[in-house]
């Protein structure tokens, strides 16, 4: 039986970003999650722990083996959320933050926000998403995606992890060699914690720029986990 692929998006995004990948994967069972830390309501910003709770809740409702993929910030979320008894067969970190207990995303980038973070109180916006996230995405799809990018909770970037899922569950790290958001050298360093390392010559959003290639990379992982 093919496991259910649970897709956890990165900061500033939503489940909408997975649509091309879901189409490319065809009949693979897919479950997407919209994280509470993303949204334009300044009165209700979620945080890392709320995001992890949302993932745990989703996993509890899936009565099948699962492979959980986290993209970018979503890597921190799945690391916090998944435990040995979560029913997860494999973790996939797609150009993602693969952190240890006690580490935070902001700490992982050196403690200083990148220049493209546009901080407004409790929220963070992105000043140049087309360059940072979509440098190899077709122009029309880039324009549609930029229009859907939302604010993100600042607290979610500052909070330390209390769990390290990759110590209990097998994992694969996918390094994206043209990434403008998380430098490839930083991905290489974090990938040392994963059991397997794969590479794509893409920017930060291969689910938009090369969904068929990403689907082809994921299918063997799903097959092994089934």
Image (cartoon, helix red, strand yellow):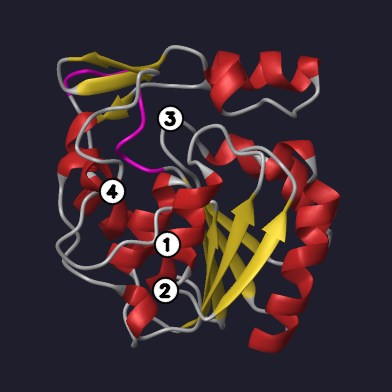
- Asked if 153 appears above or below 122 in the picture, the reply is below
Mark in front: 3 vs 4: 4
Q: Percent x, y for residue 215?
A: 78, 59
Cα distance in 3D space between marks 3 and 1: 22 Å
Q: Nearer the N terminus, badge 3 or badge 4? A: 3
Q: Nearer the N terminus, badge 1 or badge 4? A: 4
Q: Are marks 3 and 4 in contact (CB under 8 Å)?
A: no
* Label 2 secondary element: loop
- Asked if 211 appears above or below 146 in the picture, the reply is below
Residue 226 visible somewhere in the drawing? no
**Looking at the image, which residue is at 75% across and 28% down?**
137
Q: Are marks 2 and 1 in contact (CB under 8 Å)?
A: yes
Cα distance in 3D space between marks 2 and 4: 14 Å
Question: Which residue is tagged 1?
Answer: 190
**Looking at the image, which residue is at 50% across and 41% down?**
183
Q: Percent x, y for residue 38?
A: 36, 32
At label 3, counting other C-alpha atoms closer than 10 Å, the crowd grade (few under 14, some 14-19, many 20 or more) is: many
Q: Would residue 33 be counted in the magenta stretch?
A: no
- 54 sits left or right of 155 in the view: right
Question: Which residue is tagged 2?
Answer: 193
Q: Nearer the N terminus, badge 2 or badge 4? A: 4
Cα distance in 3D space between marks 3 and 4: 18 Å
Locate the N terminus and report the quarter of the image it occupies.
bottom right
* Label 1 secondary element: helix
Mark in front: 2 vs 3: 2
Q: Which residues are magenta?
A: 35-43
Question: Which residue is tagged 4?
Answer: 108
- Residue 12's label in the rendered image is 3
**Looking at the image, which residue is at 66% across and 47% down?**
177
At label 1, counting other C-alpha atoms closer than 10 Å, the crowd grade (few under 14, some 14-19, many 20 or more) is: many
Q: Are marks 1 and 4 in contact (CB under 8 Å)?
A: yes
């Amino acid at each position: 039986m093919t496991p259910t692929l649970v897709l956890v998006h990165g900061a500033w995004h939503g489940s909408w970003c997975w649509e091309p990948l879901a189409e490319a994967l065809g009949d693979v069972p897919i479950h997407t999650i919209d994280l509470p830390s993303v949204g334009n309501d300044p009165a209700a910003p979620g945080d890392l722990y709320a995001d992890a709770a949302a993932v745990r809740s989703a996993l509890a409702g899936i009565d099948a083996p699962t492979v959980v993929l986290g993209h970018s910030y979503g890597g921190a979320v799945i690391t916090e959320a998944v435990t040995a008894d979560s029913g997860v067969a494999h973790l996939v970190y797609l150009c993602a933050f693969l952190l240890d207990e006690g580490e935070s995303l902001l700490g992982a980038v050196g403690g200083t926000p990148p220049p493209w973070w546009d901080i407004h109180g409790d929220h963070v916006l992105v000043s140049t998403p087309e360059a940072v996230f979509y440098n190899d995405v077709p122009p029309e799809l880039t324009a549609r995606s930029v229009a859907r990018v939302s604010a993100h909770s600042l607290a979610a970037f500052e909070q330390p992890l209390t769990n390290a899922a990759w110590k209990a569950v097998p994992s694969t790290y996918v390094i994206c060699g043209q990434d403008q958001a998380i430098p490839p050298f930083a991905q290489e360093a974090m990938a040392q914690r994963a059991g397997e390392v794969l590479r794509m010559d893409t920017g930060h959003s291969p689910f938009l720029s090369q969904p068929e290639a990403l689907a082809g990379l994921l299918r063997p992982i799903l097959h092994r986990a089934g």
